[in-house]
Amino acid sequence: MKTVLITGASSGIGKELAYVYARENYNLIITARRRKRLEKIKEDIEKDYPVSVTIIEADLSGCHAADKFYQDLKNNNHKVDVLINNAGFGIKAGFSETDIQKEEDMLMLNMVALTTLTRLFGNDMINNGGGHIINIASTAAFQPVPMMAAYAATKAYVLNFSEAIAHELKKDNVKVTVICPGGTQSEFAEVAGFDKEKNITTNGPTSREVAEFTYKMMKKGTVTAIHGTMNRVMTMGVRFTPRKLATKIAGKIME
């Protein structure tokens, strides 16, 4: 039986990914900062599915946190067949107004921890003859986004990084998929600081829908997968729009 590691698994897309992969007969390693939520997910899954769930409480935004997390797993002889780098958060505010420590934590989690885990578990997969890495990006990766400048930049990094290593690792039988959802019903908007009456995710797809889409794209071996027809149309349109205009439009949407 294969094992999937899911970061940021206590809520939203990460939580729903845990249920989807349990249904598909994967053992799970789930990690997040909120242990009680992980314990409830473990209880629910092990009651309904014949799989094992290992929970690890961890904050991957700290310096060298991803390295320590990986080493702890290795010390306990855990083998990961599928890595899903889902942990991440955003900040909605003018760049000059944001808390710089919070910005740095976001950069560490969204990019550095993701890169570190991809490298370490990816090397294990090479040595084991194959595996699959799934990185969760965003439709924000396709253009600059005023009022979420650093967040959108982190997701652009995830997109480009994932597409590049997908090419590199193909020869090693390690597949890479980058998922780009749009606004999704989850805690993301609340954490990011969106006003409730201006929450652009309220009418978006559910986290379960994105999780199901993620599993489907993994099975197909897709490299870049944009969730939702309108999102695919919009991201295609951005490619043919002058960047100054695309930035202005994104800024209007965020207002």
Image: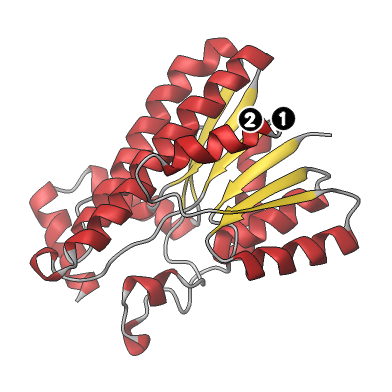
Q: Nearer the viewer, residue 79 or 242?
A: 79
Is any atom of residue 121 visible in this view? Answer: yes
Is any atom of residue 236 visible in this view? Answer: no
Amino acid identity at mark 1: Asn
In the depicted structure, whether residue 178 falls above or below residue 44: above
Could you tell me which quadrant the N terminus lies in? top right
Disc 2 and disc 1: Cα gap in Å? Answer: 5 Å
Category of crowding for the residue at label 1, using alpha-carbon neighbours closer than 10 angstroms: few (below 14), some (14–19), many (at least 20): few
Q: Residue at x 18, y 48 (%)?
A: 241
Q: Quadrant of residue 80?
A: top right
Amino acid identity at mark 2: Lys
In the depicted structure, whether residue 69 falls above or below residue 211: above
Residue at image mark 2: 74
Residue at image mark 1: 77
213 to the left or right of 2: left
Under tag 2, what secondary structure?
helix
255 to the left or right of 30: left
- The x and y percentages for residue 185 are 51, 72
206 to the left or right of 135: right
Q: How many marks?
A: 2
Q: Residue at x 22, y 54 (%)?
A: 150
| Res 226 label | none
Category of crowding for the residue at label 2, using alpha-carbon neighbours closer than 10 angstroms: few (below 14), some (14–19), many (at least 20): few
Q: Residue at x 71, y 65 (%)?
A: 39
- The x and y percentages for residue 54 are 73, 49
Q: Residue furthest bottom?
A: 197
Could you tell me which quadrant the C terminus lies in? bottom left
